[in-house]
Amino acid sequence: MKDYYQILAVPGNATQADIRKAYYKLAKQYHPDLSPNAAHHHKFLEINEAYEILGDKQKREIYHYRWVNYKNQPKATTTGPQPFNRSTQTQTRRPQATYRPPQPPPHFRQHYQNYTRPSYQEYEPILRRICQIVLVLSCLILADKFLAHRLANETITQIAFPHFNTRSESPVYVTTQYRTFRINYRDFDEIRPATAETIDLWRTPFFRQFTHLTYYGQKQRINKDSVYHNFFILVLLQIAASVVGLNKKIRWQARMNAGIIAGFFGLITLILLYVSF
């Protein structure tokens, strides 16, 4: 019986991801286009044959059952030729035992616990990429918040109230001599700036978000329902989740959950950023 695990140089409890990595590594090493050696061509055929069985979960389960029984069956021992004895030929033959199919050994299930349970470890590169993207986005927002610069002496020239509704987060568009920015009505109602008045604005360098407004010497937060104020906890949580998802010293189940949480929080953060523009 061919030992496909030995051909791919992986243990019997290897995961599907480990088998795939071993196959790609060996196939690249013994590919006929890279080596004209006939022995390498034969080795390449064996590698393909092994991966065809071990790369498929159903085929591997059938093969693994036979492989475990083959490894655990007792080795046949030979005692040499026996002298011929005619008297033994006349003896009544013992009835042969009925055939019993091979039974799985007690530790058979231990060989399957890595891949019969859905581990989803083949999706680890995707989750790692998601964690990297979310971590970069979070660091940008973190730096954006604390590097906001001051725009001094902005004179208000116009205030527009489109779809005015005091009970909602209707945007109010304030125009100065240099720019136009939006502010939620609730924040506008707290400050109540008027036209021809001078204000100072605080704008972030990367995403160009207005976070504070200084009116009569009082610096107040504006657009509070954003990731820069009320939802800033999302940024801190997704940073922590991304770090856990990228740490290979933590077991895979915890990293997978952390990566999913980081991706979910990152999606909410993108939505909040999109709405704030």
Image (cartoon, helix red, strand yellow):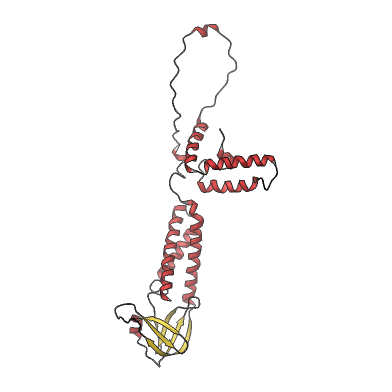
Q: Which residue is the extreme one toward the left?
A: 167
All told, the count of numbered labels is 0
Task: Say which residue appears at 47% left-offset and 53% top-offset.
Answer: 252
Across and down, in percent, residue 24 comes to 59, 48
Across and down, in percent, residue 237 comes to 42, 65
- Can the viewer see residue 221? no
Task: Say which residue appears at 68% left-offset and 39% top-offset.
Answer: 39
Across and down, in percent, residue 217 comes to 41, 88
Task: Say which residue appears at 48% left-offset and 62% top-offset.
Answer: 131
Judging depth in this view, the residue of 129 and 148 nearest the camera is 129
Q: Which residue is the extreme one toward the bottom?
A: 196
Across and down, in percent, residue 73 comes to 51, 29
Judging depth in this view, the residue of 165 and 116 nearest the camera is 165
Picture quarter with the N terminus? top right
Give the side of residue 93 with respect to residue 33, left or right.
left
- Can the viewer see residue 185? yes
Give the side of residue 185 with respect to residue 129, left or right.
left
Q: Is residue 64 above or below residue 246?
A: above
Q: Is residue 102 above or below residue 109?
A: above
Judging depth in this view, the residue of 1 and 247 nearest the camera is 1
